[in-house]
Amino acid sequence: MGHSLITISIQLPDASSFLSSETHSLIKAVIFLLALMTGLLVYILISLLFKNRRERLRKRLSRITDLLIQRMLFNEDQEFAGNLTSGAGRFLKLKTFRNLLIEELVRAKKNFSGVAANNLQLLYQECDLSNDSYQKLVSRRWYLKAMGIQELAEMGQNKSFDLIFELTNHSNEQVRMEAQNAVVKFSGLTGLNFLDFLTYPLSDWQQIQLINQLGDVDQNASDYIRKWIGSSNNSVVIFSLKLAARYHHFELHDRVALCLTHPSEEVRYHAIKTLKEIFDENTSANLVKLYDAEGLRNQLVILEVLQNIGTEKELPFLEREFTRDQNEIRLAAGRAIARVADMQYLESRSVSTEYPWTEIIQQIKGELRK
Amino acid sequence: MSWQTFIVDFFTYGILLYSVALLSSYVFIALYSVGITRDHLRKNTFTDYRILASSDQLPGLSILAPAYNEGNTIIENVRSLLSIHYNNVELVVINDGSKDDCLQKLIEGYNLYKTDHFVNEQLSTKKVRGVYRSHNPVYNKLIVVDKENGGKADALNVGINIASKDYIVCIDVDCILEQDALLKMALPFMEHPGKRVIASGGVVRIVNDCVVKNGKILKINLPESFIPRMQTLEYIRAFLLGRMAWSRMNGLLLISGAFGAFDKEIVIKCGGYNHKTVGEDMELVVRMRRYMEERKEPYKVTYIPDPLCWTEAPNSFQILGRQRNRWTRGTIETLWFHRKMFFNPKYGFLGLVSYPYWFFFEFLAPIIEFVGFIALFFFAIFGLIDWVVFLSLFAFILSFGLLYSMFAIFIEVITYNQYNRTRDIFKLILTAIAEPFIFHPFVVWSAIKGNIDLVQKKNSWGEMTRQGFAKPKTS
């Protein structure tokens, strides 16, 4: 913190009349700051007290929620939930307890499936906690809305689907993400229909979450994916390409290959990566044709893909790249040659005794040994 | 108006304007930081890091840890770094020509062998003597590089040349990272479609007097000694208020050298770390931003308020002085290298706000303050001071500084609440009260020495002596 204001007083020895009123104001300002400080100190201490007390209360209550959840998890008697919740009746009147119970149920539900997961859902219903979640869903505060969505989805409240689906293109990113995750959790691939009208981009993180929610996808998915690959939203195209690669939809090869001419470099990058998973006999040749027009990042990914799907037909091209002036390209092309042909073939190239090719070859040798 | 009056008025009102601007910026930063920290905490409750941890689309990270004469602690430090939760990662330890047995200890401790590794010299560096890997598959993420001594920036550049992943995480090898630090650090790179995240920083906290076992923090304590405790308060202010506010404005110029993640492609395109400055961490961020601005590519530098990295703070005025001296030189060098951006509209917010802020309020502040102290001394001798005015102003500034510190403590309590005992809060407030009389004058003096050293072209790094961490008590 600078104390440079002290210099002002030094410079005004003959201006005391001006400063006398200023001094008065300064003293007032100091008193104001001291009052603010005192207020802040009290607020800090109260906050600390409440925060620590709340923590202790949560710890106490969490013993009860843990007990409820544990007893419910492995229970097979349908009426047991009712008995259990009537026993916890007085606690259920506490908002803190209800919120904590929902939080614990959501956390536990993520770790269980089958009967145990159904039992947790039953406990949620018996305690009438869905009302709490609905109240959050209609809240104007984004974090409450997002929390409500998460709770309803995790607890399988299918009747909230329509309400939540409307939020899949919400202006708040977190609300939108939770809504998208929720609809996919409810209905799997068909939940992804929001991609038809999504105007916001899907972040890489959201794509990971959606893929995680999807789990296994049946073969009919290719019709949906084909539609989304044609989307005007580039992030939707990229997500669709990832789906095509993940679920090995070979029937989409031609549609994916069309993306090699997409105006977005990022889309082309993902199309190249996808073709590694769903290639046919023409893929390598198509990638080689594309190669010269691409930037370094896409060139490197093409060489990486050729390591896996390249054939002897691509060897002349790979040899040309092996002698290029960029070391990353040389290394990637060398790796591809070693895989497509063999190590001996690579070592027999004319440059193989020169720097840096000798070192590159040694490294590739070491990698193959591993 | 006589020329004497003109000079006095110019000086008086100039300094007044400067002070008002400085204090206003503090108020703005304090208030502006609250929103982003609150939103981060709320968003964090929705993030399931297990999904990220298990994803095969996790961005690849290369941790770069330069080591110089760290033989006493290197085995433990590397073990701690290898235990971090993250799948797609490699740890590159760069032995920067240590004079001790650092390399030998690594070879023996991790069963290393010299491998044929092609070093792609995208950045020119001192000579690499060898690249080592472990025979033990448990340590397959570990790469040790032995090189000629060239300083931290040079060591990091070697690490960049060796790194095979898309993002690099530069850390001090003796830092302690939280187990989920890399997951949290990776997330911002995946969250901003349409904008390239070129760098991301995490909050660094002071580990002095915390209980540490096997490279993990078992109990967080407020440092007992004054100097580290003062730095704890300083770090809370700087990270929770300053950097969060600048991050929200997308105007951050500094990511701590102790823990920062960078987009490797952009780092290489910018030429890597600059070994001509002792402020290589700040200089890299400024150069990366400048690079993106000049190419008019949308980008972002993010910051995470979660405490992710713990470091030992200097515990003596001697070592603290060296550190602050170096920080000052680093700041001035960086500002000098990039002087083209000063109030240059071509660089947008960076040129019109971030750079001038650092120039006026980080570089000039200690100089102006020091000149003020000297003037105060002489005017006091010649009886030219109106003491009532002086004391009123002094009380105002002290109160303002204390209020700012208390606000930072308040934000800490309502967010991470790591020092959650009432006596810790009072200790922090007492530390804040003592700061202007003990700590602050020393920091200003160290900054002045940094300026003098720079003029005299002294560019030493300054040795940092570590005391080691507190071990858990055994009964």
Image (cartoon, coloured by chain):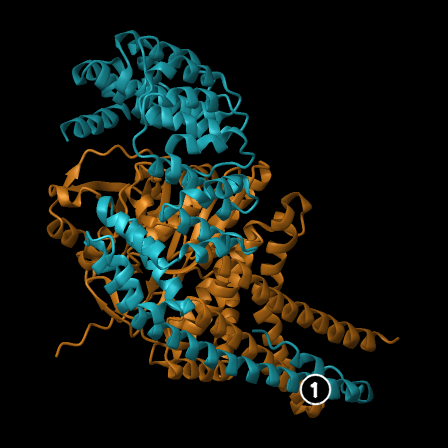
Chain colours: A cyan, B orange
From the viewer's perspective, tell me whether residue B364 is left or right of residue B63.
Answer: right
Q: Which quadrant of the structure image shows residue B53?
A: top left
* Residue that mark 1 sits on: A28
Q: Is residue A136 left or right of residue B67?
A: right
Disc 1 chain ID: A
Q: The C terminus of chain A is located in which quarter?
A: top left
Instruction: Say how many tags the image has.
Output: 1
Q: Which quadrant would residue A4 be assigned to in this image?
A: bottom right
Q: Position of residue B264 (x, y in %)?
A: 40, 40
Compared to A45, does B33 lie above or below? above
Q: Is residue A277 above or below residue A179?
A: above
Three-letter amino acid code at the position of disc 1:
Lys
Residue A367, located in which quarter of the rendered image? top left
Give the residue at the far right of this rendering: B1
Residue A359 seen from this side: yes
Q: Can residue A325 be seen in this snapshot?
A: no
Q: Position of residue B413 (x, y in %)?
A: 44, 72
